[in-house]
Image (cartoon, rainbow, N blue to C red):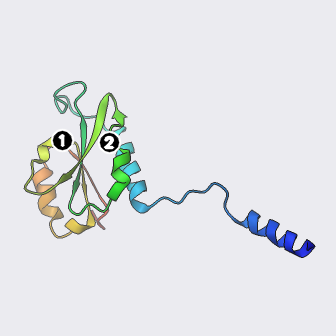
Amino acid sequence: MRRWLVCLIIALLMRPLGAEVYSEYVLKAAYLYNFTKFVEWPQGVFPAANSPLVICIAGADSFGDALTTLDGKMVEGHPVEVRLFFLAARPDQCHVVFIGRSEQGQFKAMLAKLARLPILTVSDISNF
């Protein structure tokens, strides 16, 4: 009996208490949100004081529900809004564009299209 009690106590001590496991994309969503807090946006980027800060996801949406946590959060008085973005879409409506791995073949074309716009580009593509 005593041996079982010792084994049980050891097993409980070895288990991490309160540790939460976050998916890769939950962490990436948090990074995207936190990046926006450190950007000094040029004047005129927001048409109004309460205009949304738009985070666009280019390519396949690997984030799933992870991005829903960002909708409605505030950054300097601007509510965060998340949208899917395609190369043919109007990138001038985005403040942040995340280019996913699914766009590796076209990311240079995307960067060329975004180059002259006041947009923060973020990616998980190697050597971005």
Q: Label 2 sits on what residue type?
A: Asp
- Neighbor class of circle 1 (other Cα within 10 Å; few <14, some 14-19, many 20+) is some
Instruction: Tell me which label, 2 or 1, sits earlier in the chain.
Output: 2
In percent of width and height, residue 95 lies at: 22, 42
- Tell me which residue sits at (38%, 59%) in the image: 25
The amino acid at mark 1 is Pro
| Residue 72 in the image: above or below residue 4 | above
Residue located 34% across and 29% down the image: 76
Q: Does residue 3 appear in the picture of this structure?
A: yes
| Residue 98 sits above or below residue 81 on the image | below
Task: Tell me if 79 is positioned left or right of 85 in this view.
Answer: right
Determine whether the residue tagged by mark 2 lies in a helix, strand or loop. Answer: loop
Compute the Cα span from label 2 to label 1: 21 Å
**Among all residues in the image, which is located at the extreme top?**
49
From where the camera sits, is residue 116 visible? no
Task: Point out residue 115 in the picture as x, y percentages from the top left corner.
Answer: 14, 50
Q: Quadrant of the C terminus?
A: bottom left
- Mark 1, residue position: 118
Q: Is residue 3 left or right of residue 86?
A: right
Q: Nearer the viewer, mark 2 or mark 1?
A: 2
Residue with the mark numbered 2: 71
